[in-house]
Image: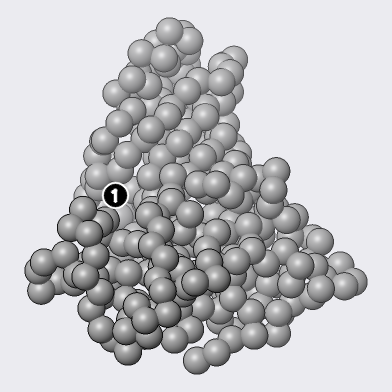
Amino acid sequence: MRFPFTGVIPVDKPRGVTSRRVVDVVARGLGMRAVGHAGTLDPLATGVLVVCVGHATRLVDHLHDLPKHYTAVFQLGRSSPSDDCETPIEMEENPPRPSHEAIEGAAAAFRGDILQRPCDYSAVHVDGRRAYRLARAGRPAGTALEARPVRIDRLEIRAYRWPHLEVEIICSSGTFVRAIGRDLAAAAGTRAVMESLVRTAVGPFTIDRSVPLDRFEEVGGDQRVRESLLPAAAAVGHLPLVALDAAALEQAVRGGLLPLDEAAAESLAAVDPDGALVGILKRHPSGGHRLRPNFLGR
């Protein structure tokens, strides 16, 4: 299938707007349905939401591989079912007030590869149902949510003045920032809810180079959507690149296997002789070091 537009748009999502709403605004501006996003941001959160258009929707999994950068503010000495301010907050009686040194010491255990229990109010599936649906129905989901491996490459205390704790985080996809605050506070002897969250970057897509959503909703927003579209190659700049000549491209399009260097990575971004992205080459499961193409728009 051919699409009139293909590419990615980094959008600066405002607070109180769902990720689905962002996709709808972009889809309306382009007049097409093949639009999706790479990594949900909760309505409470703001910042970078990468929107994929046309054939670039096939690149979502590769965008998920990119590190996520966040700035989060937590309120200590309180808790809520959702670990943020979206559900009723319970204040601790005479809560302990950990020192800055205690918070710093506790943070050390949350850097690197860790196991993290998802938030009860999350989209994680529990026995075929979303955890947040179970939680809203009054059924405790916490005991059924198993800890999962995530990676936190950076967890730095930016500011701390009781009860407010501001942290900077770089983490893998699938990490719950709310849960970082919850667990970090528990390790320091108290509790926490997330007050605000800003996603400042997704890989190379930074907030200062993202387009505010309201620009797309103004008069002439459809033109601004089209002008903001980046080439699909922007989504896979972290992958090794392989240039295909005309013969290799024709072979790949026909489903042929391409023999490449035995040191080739599991996934490669393939470009045509003009340098345009034509698809992702995947290592073939039958063995050897040949790669099977999975092409965009072919």
Q: Residue at x 59, y 15 (%)?
A: 161
Left or right: 120 with respect to 264?
right
- Quadrant in which residue 155 is drawn: top left
Question: In this orientation, does residue 220 appear?
Answer: yes
Q: Is residue 181 above or below residue 164?
A: below
Q: Position of residue 247 (x, y in %)?
A: 37, 81
Left or right, residue 162 beside residue 270: right
Q: Residue 95's spot in the image, x, y percent? A: 46, 18
> Residue sitting at 59 percent across and 56 percent down?
49
Is residue 123 in sight in this rendering? no
Left/right placement of residue 200 relative to residue 226 reads: left
Q: Which residue is mark 1?
A: 142
Give how far across and how far down residue 81 sits, in percent: 43, 46
Q: Between 5 and 123, which is closer to the camera in this rendering?
A: 5
Task: State the residue lying farthest toward the right.
Answer: 219
**Residue closest to the eye, 120 or 258:** 258
